[in-house]
Structure formats: C-alpha cells, structure tokens
C-alpha cells in the first residue's frame, strides 16, 4: 500500500519549490494562450515581462486551440508577439478531448521547463487545462481576468472560470465586481489583486494603427452608418433556433443599414450546415449584408470604433465597445462583465429579435453619449501585473508566506509517506 502510493508519487512527482530561492536568478514564467482573445491579452504582458529580463525568463506557450491564420497568426504579427517558444498543436475537438490534449502536452512542457509560474488568461478550455496541470505539479498559477462570473453554468466558459479561480495562487482581476465574486466564494483576500483590464492595454497601444486601417473603404462603409455583428457562443449558434434568430436580426436591420458580419469559424460552419436562407445570405443574396472572414485586430478595431452600433455575444467586444463609447447590444441572457453595463455602453438584450432590432435602429439614429472608462482600464494593466508577479516570485509578502506554508506542509506530508 505504502509503496504503491510512493511509486505513484514518483511518476506524478509534484514540482515542489520552496520560496527561498536565489533572488538574483530570473524566474521562468510560461504564458499560456490558445484562442483569439488570449492573444490580445497576452501581447502587453509579454512585452512588460520581457522588458524585465533580469527578473523573468518569459516563455510563450500556444496550445493550438485556434489555428487558422485569421484566428491566430495575424494577431502575433499585428501585435508584435514573437513566435511561440512552445506550440502544442492540439487543434479542435470535444471539450473533453481538447482539454485532455492540452493537459497531456502541457504536462510534458512543465516537466521539461520546470517553470516558477504559469500565467493563464480568460476562460477558454486551454485556460482550465493549463491551470489544472500546473496546480497538480505544484507550480504557481496566476489567472489574468480572474473573478468574472455569468452565474450561468450552461456556459463552458463559466465552468472554466470557476475551476481556474479555485486553483490559482494569484487572482488578477479587471474590476471590483470580480473581487467581490471571489471573496464571496471564499478566496483568501491576499490572493486577489485588482489590476484592471489588460485587453484595454492592447486597444490603447494599437488604436493609432487601427485608425490607419482602410477597411471602411474596402467594404464601402460610411462611419456610423453601419451595424457590426459578431456571434460565436454555442448557445446562440449551435442550434437552428438560435441561428434563425440571428438571421432574423440581420435581415431586419439590413432593411435600413449595412450589417458587417465577420463570421467566426464555428458560426460559419453551422451556417453552411443550415442551408436555405443562411446559404443564400452567405452567397451574397441579402443586399446590405457584408459577410467576411474573421478579421485582423486592426481592421476589426476600426470597424468597432466607427460602427453606429455593435451587436455581439463576445466578452472582449463588450469591453472594447464600452471603452470606445460605441453602443453595444449583447445578444445573451447574461454577462460576466456587468461593469460594461454599469460603467459602459453595453445593453443586455438576449437573443430577442424585436428588442435587438428596435435598439439597433434607435442607436443608429441617436448621437453617441460620452462615457468614462471603468477604473484601471487605462492601458497600464500589464505593468501592474508584472509588479504583482515580481512581488509574488521574489517578495516576502503575505501571499508568499501563505504559499511557503502550503509547500512546507506538503513536503512534511510527503516525508511522512516515505518513512
Ligand atoms: C473558444 C472558447 C470561447 C472563446 C472563443 C473565442 C472554449 C470552450 N471556447 O470558442 O470561450 O470565446 O474561443 O473566439 O474554450 N475552428 C476553426 N479554426 C480555428 C478554430 C476553430 O475552424 O482556428 C472551428 C472548429 O470547427 C472548432 C470550432 O471552430 O470545432 C470551435 O472552436 P473552439 O476553439 O472549440 O471553440 P470556439 O467556439 O472558438
Ligand atoms: N476580434 C478580431 N477580429 C474579429 C473578431 C474579433 O480581431 O473578426 C477581436 C476583438 O477585437 C477582441 C477579441 O477578438 O479583441 C475577442 O475575441 P472573441 O470575440 O473571439 O472572444 P471572446 O472575447 O468572446 O472570448
């Protein structure tokens, strides 16, 4: 009994590291990203950590969850992210397959690289998989965008957020509501740090590049005379009723305005499978509908900024439109980003055709109202995160002590097993 526990422990040996280390040696930090919104969040943090090379040896790990060049490569090029140091190439699959593949491949890398910390972003399957794998190896996990909750457990992202936050050692939040959610769940206060919204760092830095985009000319659009639409949530696009509502909304708004719809691959695949009206629309059969491939960050940001109204089920787009002061209609019954409603331009509409069309028409006609960005959505979140990682990895703060105690307790437990 004892020896079988020991041999198991050998093959799954957790990577226990004490806090007393050499403070002059850079710490190895692996940034894990897998899908489009992750790349937008990773870019500024990579820059901030890479510029502190005396403190951090920073590695980028791409899980390969998104792989089309328009869902992945273009973001690395435009945002100046170096090629990933590690590429897992996991691709698509069921939730279980995708999560399991990331876990298996991550585990090999974590064993090989022995990082001091793994940083995960957002709420995708790769986020969950890397957090679980790192935590089981005893590697510290930092979660960027911690604490957001839709309170809707039918969304895969909500499950990913709950598990990741439960395991993370450092919970880096974008807004106060996220802190409150974590405290309510019993996360110790010293693990939570309000750092602001890292997506806004990227937006602030690259808005001048987006302003130079000629996407409006290319698509023959006039500023504020078109609606922008993005849809990819399974709850909206994975069944016929949801897709029918999306097509109804497009058809009705397109009676008066151009509708620009850069279709996510999940959505395009489902529209193709639908046939009928969807097929007709995709083949150019609806005047005023401008359907495109997924767009690069610069073109898409320009389209958001100049749209009369943006309709979406994307998390990131709710935040970006709020920052830009563009009216946003969220076609979901809930949002994990309530601050975009209380402090931004977001309106929760659900997949309600009449309400979406009525609101879209109204916002297309009304002048924009000036908005102030939420606190700490200021373009400096990555620097705050870099400071926080430094404190965590080199400091003697309470969070470090807490972790040291956990590690020491675990070492004691392992020692007890070996006698
Ligand atoms: C994923 C995230 C979602 C995030 C979204 C960002 C999960 C559970 N979902 O959703 O939270 O908002 O990314 O866009 O992690 N596909 C391609 N090419 C690609 C990528 C995907 O064709 O480069 C197709 C495949 O058919 C795939 C489908 O899109 O099966 C869905 O991709 P997947 O990464 O599983 O989920 P997303 O819907 O993209
Ligand atoms: N985005 C983009 N091109 C597009 C659609 C979105 O560059 O065609 C950007 C958008 O500006 C934001 C991010 O992708 O930065 C949002 O990703 P997505 O909507 O896929 O994921 P979510 O935020 O819902 O997880």
Image (cartoon, helix red, strand yellow):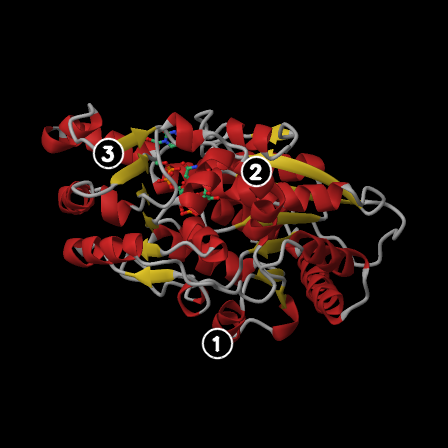
Q: In the displayed structure, would residue 126 be above or below residue 271?
A: below
Q: Residues within 10 Å of mark 1 (few under 14, many from 20)?
A: few
Where residue 163 sits in the image (x, y, percent)? Answer: 47, 58
- Tell me the element at label 3: strand
The quadrant holding residue 56 is top right
- Tell me the element at label 1: helix
Where residue 141 sits in the image (x, y, percent)? Answer: 62, 53
Q: Which residue is mark 2?
A: 106
Where residue 43 sits in the image (x, y, percent)? Answer: 62, 41
Q: Residues within 10 Å of mark 3 (few under 14, many from 20)?
A: many
Q: Look at the numbered disc 2 and say if its residue's Cβ is closer than 8 Å to ligand 1.
A: no
Kindly identify the residue that appears in the image at 44 percent across and 52 percent down.
Answer: 321
- Quarter of the image where the C terminus is located: bottom right
- The front one of 308 and 85 is 308
Q: Which residue is mark 3?
A: 289
Q: Which residue is mark 1?
A: 184
User: Mark 1 or 2, which is nearer the eye?
Assistant: 1
Q: Residue 249: tell me if it is visible.
A: yes
Q: Residue 335: tell me if it is visible.
A: no
Where residue 9 sits in the image (x, y, percent)? Answer: 62, 48
- The front one of 291 and 63 is 291
Residue reaching furthest left? 276
Kindly identify the residue that appears in the image at 22 percent across and 55 percent down.
Answer: 356
Q: Horizontally, is 329 left or right of 107 in the view?
A: left
């Amino acid at each position: 009994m004892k020896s079988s526990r020991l041999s198991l422990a050998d093959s799954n040996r957790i990577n226990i590291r004490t806090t007393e280390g050499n403070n002059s040696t850079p710490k190895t930090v692996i940034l894990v990203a897998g899908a489009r919104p992750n790349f937008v969040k990773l870019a500024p943090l990579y820059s901030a950590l890479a510029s502190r090379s005396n403190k951090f040896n920073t590695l980028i790990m791409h899980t390969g969850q998104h792989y089309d060049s328009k869902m992945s490569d273009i973001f690395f090029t435009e945002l100046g992210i170096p090629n990933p140091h590690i590429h897992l190439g996991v691709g698509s699959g069921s939730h279980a397959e995708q999560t399991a593949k990331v876990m298996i491949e991550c585990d090999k890398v974590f064993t090989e690289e022995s990082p001091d910390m793994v940083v995960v972003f957002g709420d995708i399957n790769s986020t969950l998989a890397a957090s679980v794998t790192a935590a089981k190896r005893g590697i510290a996990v930092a979660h960027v965008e911690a604490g957001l909750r839709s309170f809707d457990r039918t969304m895969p992202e909500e499950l990913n957020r709950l598990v990741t936050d439960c395991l993370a050692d450092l919970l880096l939040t974008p807004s106060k509501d996220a802190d409150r959610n974590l405290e309510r769940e019993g996360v110790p206060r010293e693990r939570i740090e309000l750092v602001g919204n890292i997506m806004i760092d990227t937006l602030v830095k690259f808005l001048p590049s987006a302003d130079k985009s000629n996407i409006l000319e290319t698509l023959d659009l006039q500023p504020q005379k078109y609606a922008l639409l993005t849809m990819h949530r399974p709850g909206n696009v994975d069944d016929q009723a949801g897709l029918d509502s999306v097509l109804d909304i497009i058809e009705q708004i397109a009676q008066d305005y151009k509708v620009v719809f850069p279709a996510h691959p999940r959505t395009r695949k489902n529209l193709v499978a639908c046939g009928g009206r969807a097929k007709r629309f995709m083949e150019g059969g609806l005047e005023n509908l401008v359907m495109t491939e997924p767009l690069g960050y610069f073109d898409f940001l320009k389209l958001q900024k100049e749209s009369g109204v943006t309709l979406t089920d994307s998390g990131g787009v709710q935040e970006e439109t709020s920052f830009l002061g563009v009216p946003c209609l969220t076609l979901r019954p809930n949002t994990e980003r309530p601050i975009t409603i209380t402090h931004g331009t977001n309106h929760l509409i659900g997949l309600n055709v009449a309400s979406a069309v009525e609101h879209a028409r109204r916002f297309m006609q009304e002048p924009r109202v000036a908005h102030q960005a939420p606190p700490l959505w200021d373009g400096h979140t990555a620097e705050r995160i870099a400071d926080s990682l430094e404190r965590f990895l080199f400091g003697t703060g309470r969070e470090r002590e807490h972790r040291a105690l956990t590690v020491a307790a675990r070492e004691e437990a392992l020692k007890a097993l070996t006698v």
